[in-house]
Amino acid sequence: MAILVTGGAGYIGSHTCIELLKAGEEIVVLDNFYNSKPAAVELISEISGKDFKFYHADMCDQEAVDDIFEENDIEAVIHFAGYKAVAESVREPLMYYRNNLTGTFCILEAMKKHGCKKIIFSSSATVYGIPEKVPVDETFPLSAINPYGNTKLIIEDMLRDVCNADKDFSAALLRYFNPIGAHESGKIGEDPNGIPNNLMPIIINVCTGKQEKLTVFGNDYPTPDGTCIRDYIHVVDLALGHLAALRSVREKKGAIPYNLGTGNGYSVLDIINTFERVNNIKIPYVIGDRRPGDAAECYSVPDKAARELGWKAERGLEQMCRDAWNFVQHNK
Ligand code: WQD
């Protein structure tokens, strides 16, 4: 039996594929390279020392998705594929609803047709909207503050409904906080196509000269240094969280949400200062206006994943910053 990894050539997907292969799992990967690169497919094999089947296809192509299930005995799906840029989703909502929801429909239809009843979904802390208080646990109210976040919320609802209709169905809803960092080898890391939106890839672009400077979006928030606080988690810790979730969907039924975070909150200036210190580099930045929709603070209570999945993040902020820069150094 194999695990189908949609979006497996992407940032979190490729790191997860490596850990799945190292753990002895058989995987099949689907990716259309919208926000990833073909080289990632080879690198997954090179780093893990294992081969796997790859399909260059779009998850919205129902026939292509059905073919994957026809040609492979799929036990479970880890569903990463989807557009993920918040600002772009505000500019192009229909593109986000069409891709993220239609793609998920196609995956779930093929799962139903082939009797596959286990899914691990790449959800996001964005389903908590702007939390009333921190830290955030899985019982907090859910709300969407942008179309991207709404696609995550709608897909969570779809999976809850599917599990209510079919008591044999299992769905782990993994709510990522802020993934950063890269594989220790330096061979894979965060390498988005186009202009990045997130803090760490922008810091990297500034340090490599691709962008002139970093704009810190506001330093007048009610936080110790005035900049926003987030729960940054090493991408390898996040990948290992998916292996723990795979064990869970093999044992438990129903749709169960889990925060995948460290439980530690760091400000934008903490990230800048730590990155500069561990990598002995200077990041030119200016203080700009607040970015609409940003919460002052958002960080997790990670206890449920520790209790029920036997998983917790092990890598600290210094390693996240070191590994992120190491990837750049290896790929100059
Ligand atoms: C982090 C902090 C910014 C850029 C988003 C999505 C979430 C997940 C992670 C997909 C914020 C500040 C950023 C810059 C800055 N994505 N910042 N200058 O907004 O917490 O979460 O990405 O799953 O779903 O919502 O991450 O990296 O965009 O921002 O000051 O040029 O860095 O204001 O405080 P965010 P981010």
Image (tube, rainbow, N blue to C red):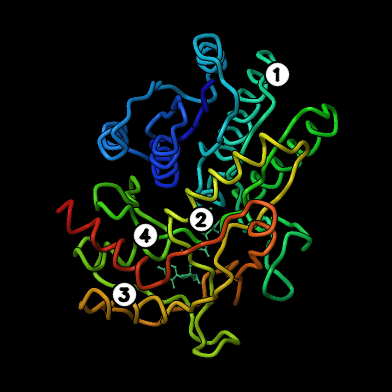
Work out whether mark 1 precedes mark 2 in sequence or the reverse, and give the earlier one: 2
Q: Which residue is more in the foreground, 93 or 225?
A: 225
Q: Residue 310 sits in which quadrant?
A: bottom right
Q: Residue 99 falls in which quadrant of the image?
A: top right
Q: Looking at the image, is 269 positioned above or below residue 59?
A: below
Q: Are marks 1 and 2 in contact (CB under 8 Å)?
A: no
> What residue does disc 4 label?
181
Query: Which of the numbered marks, if any, corresponds to residue 87?
Result: 2
Q: Earlier in the sequence, mark 4 or mark 2?
A: 2
Give the residue at mark 3.
275
Q: Secondary structure at mark 4?
A: loop
Pick out the residue farthest to the bottom: 224
Q: Give, as a three-letter code, the residue at label 4.
A: Gly
In x, y percent, where is residue 97? 62, 38
Q: CA distance from mark 1 to mark 2?
A: 33 Å
The amino acid beneath tag 2 is Ala
Circle 3: element type = helix
Quadrant of residue 10 within the rendered picture: top left
Identified at 57% across, 52% down, the residue is 90
Q: Is residue 126 above or below residue 77?
A: below
Query: What type is the residue that disc 1 sits on?
Result: Lys
Disc 4, ligand 1: is the CB inside 8 Å? no
Query: Dot 1 surroundings within 10 Å: few (below 14), some, or many (20 or more)?
Result: few
Query: Is 298 above or below relative to 54?
Result: below
| x and y, in percent, of residue 138 in the image | 73, 59
- What amino acid type is highlighted by mark number 3? Phe
